[in-house]
Image (cartoon, helix red, strand yellow):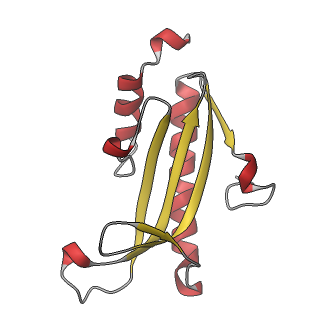
Amino acid sequence: MTLNKVTHRRLIRQFAALGPYLRELKSTETEYFFDSLSVCVSAKPEPDVREFWGWWLFLTTQDGQHFEYHYHLGLYEADGHWVEKPIPKTHQAEVTRTLRDFYDKLDGCLSELSLSMSSAASLGAEHLLSSV
């Protein structure tokens, strides 16, 4: 598949079809933003002010053919912002599962479009997706 056939709009449609991960308003033609509110901290507050443990991921490209991803783990605060924080042990497995599930979907999507991705060097050799 050539670069001309995989437009930004097509990528947006494909990424949106993966599930509730893509944040289109925070994405550009060279950087796509995804996140997952994996585990609710407490169901006591009203839904619009609840906090969640989860992850957020940036997928960037320079040439439209190869993508590089970088993710963070942390807390989605009531004010609507992510803060990098250690995930409590009781929730680590679920946050990791949702990140890996998303990664598998994203990898499959890019492969179907004859595109590739790899981890950003800043993640290092050992990270949650290095053994996927």
Is residue 131 something one can see in this rendering?
Answer: no
User: Measuring 34% from the left and 31% from the top, which residue is drawn there?
Assistant: 13
Relative horizontal placement of residue 97, taking residue 80 as reference (left or right): right
Q: Residue furthest bottom?
A: 44
Instruction: Give the vertical position of 51 relative to 107 (above or below).
Output: below
Q: Quadrant of the N terminus?
A: top right
Q: Is residue 41 left or right of residue 124?
A: left
Residue at (28% x, 78% y) in the render: 50
Image quadrant of residue 76? bottom left
Tell me what residue is drawn at x 58 percent, y 31 percent: 61
> How many discs appear?
0
Relative to 5, is 65 on the left or the right?
right
Does the image show residue 102?
A: yes
Above or below residue 103? Residue 2 is above
Residue 105: x %, y % from top left: 51, 44
The percent position of residue 124, horizontal first and vertical second, equals 78, 55
Q: Residue at x 68, y 61 (%)?
A: 128
Q: Position of residue 27 (x, y in %)?
A: 40, 40
**As drawn, is 20 to the left or to the right of 36?**
left
Q: Looking at the image, is 89 positioned above or below residue 97? A: below
Residue 28 position, x and y percent, is 41, 34
